[in-house]
Amino acid sequence: MRWRLTIPNIDATGISTSATALTGGGNSVGITLCSFWLNGPINTTSTGINLGAFGSGALIRDLIVFYFGIGIRLDFTQMVRLEGNNLQQSQRYDLYINGGSGITTIGNLFANAASTGTNPGGANVAISGGAFGIAIYDSVIDEAFSSGSSSIYIGNASDIRISNSLIYFVSGGYGISIGDGTNNPTRVSLTNIRIGPFAGNRVPINTIRIYGSGHVLKNVTTNPNGGGDIRDNTNDSVYINVNYKTLLSGGLQQLPVNPKPACNSDTVGTTWFTPGATGVKDTYEICAKDATNNYAWRTLY
């Protein structure tokens, strides 16, 4: 005996511009959406699913949502659980969380290839609008394409936890943007995260961009310019802007990397450790310019 299991297909390719395929009323409670395929019209203004403002107690599980401007949108919802969803090819955001929350959990998510959009530049997963108390775990967030886009964008939000996940991105964007210099979050926690460019010769701009305060990064690894089936051809970067100072508990170890970049206006302020051969001392340098605006590596040790 052979079993063939299929899920219902909801065809929303004919909905009008700016429409929502499935929407809940305001203050709705206890909505459950499970096990179907929702197919959209491929434009930047439509929405696949919007639970409605201030909804609570919703369960969204085992859905496939393709080709909308926004795949799933949560506006000021709380106590929402998303589990095992496949969100792909959205023109702005696969998952957009705007405000509210209070224990929203997102697990086993596959969010892929959000491509175009405006501020904050498009993202597979975007969290902003004062959202708080959100946990994302055991997920793969894959391929943010457009210039300024991010696989994960966290704007004006607080107490956001992301753990045990893979983050991939391609040219033009970031792996994770924690703030953008204007809309900046507080208390973002990244734990057991692997971030790197998607396979191929597409060169990323930055791995992580960080603004705001109170963030914790634990066991966050980035691709070290090659190896395995994930490749890139430029140095990975972590941008940190905390306005005042960065406090570290414990030592900061700077590992040797080869080759050392040229010292210029792009690398000024960079320090560099180079181990010496047997019988030769190590060197520690800083890229700095002199009074004649000549950039050079200056030996500190």
Image (cartoon, helix red, strand yellow):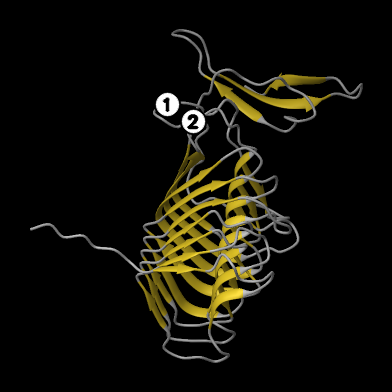
Looking at the picture, how far across and down is residue 118, in whole percent?
A: 73, 57
Q: Quadrant of residue 84?
A: bottom left
Q: Nearer the viewer, residue 280 or 160?
A: 160
Residue 16: image x %, image y %? 66, 71
Residue type pointed to by label 2: Pro
* Figure quadrant of residue 158: bottom right
Mark 2 lies on residue: 224
Question: Which is nearer the eye, 227 or 15?
Answer: 15
Amino acid at circle 1: Gly
Task: Give the class, few, some or many, for how many residues have Cα within 10 Å of label 1's Cα (few <14, many ≥20).
Answer: few
Residue at the far top in the pictured view = 279
> Which quadrant of the structure image shows residue 298?
top right
Q: Residue at x 49, y 71 (%)?
A: 134
Is disc 1 in contact with disc 2, using a CB cutoff of under 8 Å? yes
Q: Residue at x 56, y 64 (%)?
A: 13
The answer to whether residue 251 is above or below residue 127 is: above
Residue named by callout 1: 227
Q: Nearer the viewer, mark 1 or mark 2?
A: 1
For mark 2, give the secondary structure: loop
Please identify the residue farthest to the left as the structure is shown: 1
CA distance separating discs 1 and 2 = 8 Å
Q: Secondary structure at mark 1?
A: loop
Instruction: Tell me how many marks there are.
Output: 2
Dividing the image into 4 quarters, which one contains the C terminus? top right
Q: Where residue 46 sits in the image (x, y, percent)?
A: 63, 68
Q: Which quadrant, please, contains the N terminus?
A: bottom left
Task: Tell me where residue 228 appears, x and y as whole percent.
Answer: 39, 28
The residue carrying pointer 2 sits among few (fewer than 14), some (14 to 19) or many (20 or more) residues within 10 Å by Cα, namely: some
Q: Is residue 153 above or below residue 298?
A: below
| Residue name at image x 52 percent, y 67 percent | 160
Check the image and name the residue furthest to the right: 292
